[in-house]
Image (cartoon, rainbow, N blue to C red):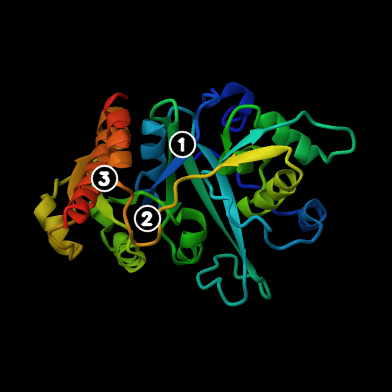
């Protein structure tokens, strides 16, 4: 039991001048290492919460199978990085299952961008997330988590298997390592910066 | 995964907390809107409102309030909306990033600088 995780008294508060919250979302299949990556980059122990969706007919993959249930719940965890006196970045680890995408706009509308965290043993788990991000017009990078890989796959092979277009950056990472996990976020923001400056100069 | 799920086994409690409201009047509260208390708790306030005012003595994101109260984001937004309406808290909103567009490069440069300094 991780009793301190939720104890605000044991968590460093933000500075009084903090005024701009920012979001980055890490999506990926179950067990791919989202929570690990969030923990590696976060200045606080990851917190978790959930959102409830009450809407008929939404629980398309509701595992409970409860008859007549018209609410569905999506849990997610998140960490925090204070960037400077005013900017604070929240990094969310979000499940990739279908019901989650009904809540994407409500929870993660306005996100800077997304990281698709990939396990090469289960590449198919990432297809749906990539499709949805493209649908929402959310810029993203793909990070291959190498933590449990017996046979290293080349990034080019992974790109082909995911049918990724050439303009989506791919990165290797070990989500357990702080520097490596941070480099994934830097890779994403570099990509966003390139996209943004390209747009501003046209 | 070490966190605990929010207890949703008490629908009556959630109903009572929100007065039966389904959605927040203040729909502009983003997950990362930073909330700041502007007053101390007063007698007669609900325990959740008191908790929020204590939590938000320093800027605290909506999603952190939700995690700390162990209440779904929607319910948290409603409770925060109450306090906003009575000006017991203020909200520092994130810069809007319209759907399918990008934040400006100046902001992204600031983010990069911050990440490089970690």
Q: Nearer the viewer, mark 3 or mark 1?
A: 3
> Crowding near pointer 3: few (<14 within 10 Å), some, many (20+)?
many
- What secondary structure is found at the residue carrying circle 1? strand
- Asked if B117 appears above or below A110 in the picture, the reply is above
Residue A91 position in % (x across, y down): 42, 41
First reached walking from the N terminus: tag 3 or tag 1? 1
Q: Quadrant of residue A177?
A: top left
- Residue plotted at (83% across, 41% down): B46
Residue A95 position in % (x across, y down): 44, 55
- Decide if residue B102 is on the left or right side of residue A45: left
Residue A29, label in figure = 2
- What secondary structure is found at the residue carrying circle 3? helix
Q: Nearer the viewer, mark 1 or mark 2?
A: 1
Q: Quadrant of the N terminus of chain A?
A: top right
Which sits in the foreground, B88 or B31?
B88
Subunit under mark 1: A
Numbered label tally: 3
Residue A102, label in figure = none
First reached walking from the N terminus: tag 1 or tag 2? 2
Q: Which residue is mark 3?
A: A188
Rounded to the nearest angstrom, the CA distance separating label 3 from label 1 is 17 Å
Q: Quadrant of residue A22?
A: top left
- What secondary structure is found at the residue carrying circle 2? loop
Subunit under mark 2: A
First reached walking from the N terminus: tag 2 or tag 3? 2
- Decide if residue B46 is on the left or right side of residue A150: right
Which sits in the foreground, A165 or B80?
B80
Q: Which residue is mark 1?
A: A79
Do dots 3 and 1 share one subunit? Answer: yes
Do dots 2 and 3 share one subunit? Answer: yes
């Amino acid at each position: 039991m991780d009793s301190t995780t939720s104890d605000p008294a044991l968590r460093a508060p933000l500075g009084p001048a903090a005024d701009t919250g920012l979001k980055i979302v890490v999506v990926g299949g179950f067990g791919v290492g989202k929570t690990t990556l969030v923990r590696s980059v976060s200045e606080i122990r990851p917190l978790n919460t959930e959102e409830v969706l009450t809407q008929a007919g939404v629980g398309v993959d509701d595992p409970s199978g409860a008859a007549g249930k018209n609410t569905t719940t999506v849990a997610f965890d998140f960490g925090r990085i204070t960037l400077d006196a005013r900017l604070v970045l929240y990094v969310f680890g979000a499940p990739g299952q279908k019901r989650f995408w009904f809540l994407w706009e409500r929870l993660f509308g306005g996100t800077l961008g997304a990281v698709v965290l990939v396990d090469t043993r289960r590449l198919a788990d990432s297809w749906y997330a990539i499709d949805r991000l493209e649908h929402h017009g959310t810029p993203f990078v793909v990070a291959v988590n190498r933590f449990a890989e017996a046979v290293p796959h080349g990034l080019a092979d992974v790109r082909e298997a995911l049918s990724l277009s050439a303009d989506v950056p791919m990165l290797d990472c070990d989500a357990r390592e702080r520097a490596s996990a941070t480099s994934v976020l830097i890779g994403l923001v570099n990509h966003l910066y390139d996209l943004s400056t390209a747009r501003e100069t046209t | 995964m070490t966190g605990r799920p929010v207890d949703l086994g008490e629908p009556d409690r959630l109903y009572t907390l929100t007065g039966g409201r389904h959605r927040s009047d203040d729909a502009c509260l983003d997950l990362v809107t930073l909330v700041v208390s502007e007053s101390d708790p007063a007698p007669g306030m609900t325990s959740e409102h008191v908790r929020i005012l204590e939590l938000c003595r320093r800027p605290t994101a909506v999603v952190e309030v939700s995690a700390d109260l162990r209440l779904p984001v929607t319910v948290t937004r409603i409770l925060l909306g109450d306090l906003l309406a009575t000006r017991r808290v203020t909200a520092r909103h994130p810069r809007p990033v319209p759907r399918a567009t990008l934040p400006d490069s100046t902001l992204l440069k600031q983010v990069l600088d911050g990440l490089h300094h970690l």
